Image (cartoon, rainbow, N blue to C red):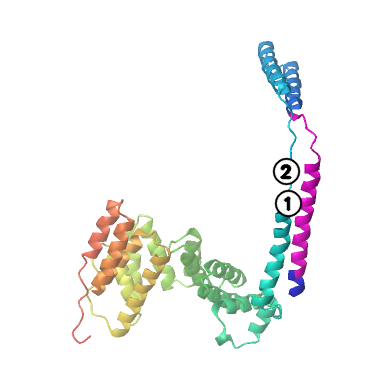
Amino acid sequence: MIAFWATAGVLSAAAAILILFRAAQAAARVEPADTTSVFYRRQLAEIGDLADRGLIGEGERRSAEIEAGRRLLAATDQPLEAWSTSPSRAPVLIAAVAAPALALALYLGLGSPGMADQPFSGRVAKWLASNPASLAPPEMAAVLDKLTKERPNDPDGYRFLALADGASNNPAGAVRALKHAVRLAPQRSDLWEMLGEAQVFRAGGELTDEAKQAFAETLKLDPKNVAARFHLARARIKAGDKAGGVADWQALLADMPPSDPRRDALQQAIAQAQGAPAPPAGLSGDQMTAVRGMVAGLAQRLAASPDDPAGWVQLVRAYAVLGETAKRDAALSDARARYAAKPDVLAELAKAAATEPMQRESGR
């Protein structure tokens, strides 16, 4: 490492000396150069060439030649000036040599010149030999990326890589890994479902055409898949078919077992689509925990991608239903400030804030 910095310093100083040497040579040639008259003589020749090719008329040629000749005479009458530079280049040379020397001295005093290089491949090998439970998500993603290259025909390897990329806040990497997985195992509905969810997450909650295609493939293989049915029904509502989308959600709700923790979130989505407050049924402790977790996830998503009017309306309504007035008011204030110029959004926010709190059973 020391050799590298010493070489870099010497090369920097040599480059600076070469530049100054060339500048000194240019400054030594102080002969005046008559470039102005050359320019106007060339312009006169070009005017004649344009006229010979018929691109300008005779009158235009004459006036242009008169103007160029006038400027040529004016330039000829002016005295020529030689170009010169400042004779003192010593400070520049001293600074050019001192800068790398000072950098090297600071590195020797404050850095770690004895530390060995740590190439990325070496770090990956070390992580590969470590306990997987001790690795951070980006480290696990790097290990799995290496393993998938060694075993490129294993769809589960890409599935685990997608999970690691997702935990590393790399949704693009997760989508890329899952596309590999579905190419290897197109008959697996779980991989298509994960691909659709990853594409929705990468798009900030938007249901893209690629995500809809992934969920459609999921339903071909698993007609009862909850996530695919939910998102495709949401796509129908967003496309303008509210009645059809809500009907699909209600059919999904009827197929879900009573113990499914996703039922309450689906009921809330149905109520929101219909413009009604969330159902006032009491929730168990576990169900309430799940609901609060989903609301917290929505708040985190809006903090990262705040340009989502429907999301803010949903967050304000959720806080109102849960009876968390302080969080409701804070979210409402942020949303009003963001959409102050959009009265339709402000009206939806006011309506959401006025939603009645959920009635809870006694003893819960």
State left or right for residue 173 relative to residue 282.
right
Q: Are marks 1 and 2 in contact (CB under 8 Å)?
A: yes
**Disc 1 designates what residue?**
89
Asked if residue 226 is positioned above or below residue 129 in the image, the reply reads: above
- Name the residue nearer the viewer: 294 or 340: 340
Considering every residue shown, the one lying at the far top of the view is 59
The amino acid marked with disc number 1 is: Arg
Considering every residue shown, the one lying at the far left of the view is 362
- Density class for disc 2 (Cα within 10 Å; few <14, some 14-19, many ≥20) is few
Q: Quadrant of residue 176?
A: bottom right
- Name the residue nearer the viewer: 237 or 284: 284
**Disc 2 designates what residue?**
85
- Name the residue nearer the viewer: 30 or 316: 30
Which SS class for mark 2?
loop
State left or right for residue 341 relative to residue 53.
left
Asked if residue 48 is positioned above or below residue 2 in the image, the reply reads: above
Q: Quadrant of residue 356?
A: bottom left
Taken as a whole, is the magenta stretch helix, strand or loop? helix
Q: Where in the figure is residue 150, as x and y percent of width and height? A: 69, 77
Read off the magenta span. 6-35
Query: Can residue 312 be seen at all in this image of the molecule?
Result: yes
Query: Can residue 257 be seen at all in this image of the molecule?
Result: no
* Point 69% across, 63% down: residue: 99
